[in-house]
């Protein structure tokens, strides 16, 4: 069985978490993605914005409320 790994780089080091096979850890991983990765982490590909901020700006430009 494969084990998935996720890294959260913060500039001062890395925090690594192991997601065990199966569905036991999936809700924890999804919460991490929703609360940290999409809400706070800046992405260089998005102009150093969070994915949520980028989506808000894109919706304003596109006229989507």
Image (spheres, rainbow, N blue to C red):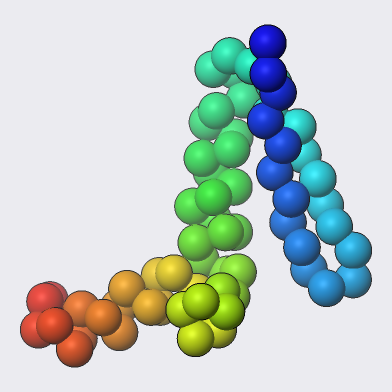
Of residue 31 and residue 37, the one placed in the foreground of this image is: 37
Query: As drawn, is 56 to the left or to the right of 50?
Result: left
Q: Residue 53 location, x and y as percent? A: 40, 78
Q: Is residue 43 left or right of residue 19?
A: left
What residue do we see at 57% from left, 79% from top? Answer: 44
Height in image: 1 above or below 40?
above
Is residue 41 toward the left or the right of residue 19 in the image? left
Whether residue 49 is visible: no
**Position in image of residue 64 (x %, y %):** 11, 76
Q: In the displayed structure, would residue 6 be above or below residue 37?
A: above
Q: Residue 26, located in which quarter of the rendered image? A: top right
From the viewer's perspective, is residue 28 above or below residue 44?
above
**Against 56, is 18 above or below?**
above
Res 19 → quadrant: top right
The residue under the point 56% across, 74% down is: 43
Image quadrant in which the N terminus is located: top right
Quadrant housing the C terminus: bottom left
Q: How many marks?
A: 0
Can residue 39 be seen here? yes
Residue 20 position in % (x across, y down): 69, 21
């Amino acid at each position: 069985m494969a084990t998935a790994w996720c890294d959260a780089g913060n500039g001062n080091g890395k925090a690594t978490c192991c997601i065990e096979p199966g569905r036991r850890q999936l809700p924890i991983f999804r919460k991490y993605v929703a609360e940290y990765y999409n809400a706070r982490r800046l992405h260089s590909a998005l102009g150093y914005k969070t994915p949520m901020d980028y989506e808000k700006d894109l919706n304003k430009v596109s006229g989507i409320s």
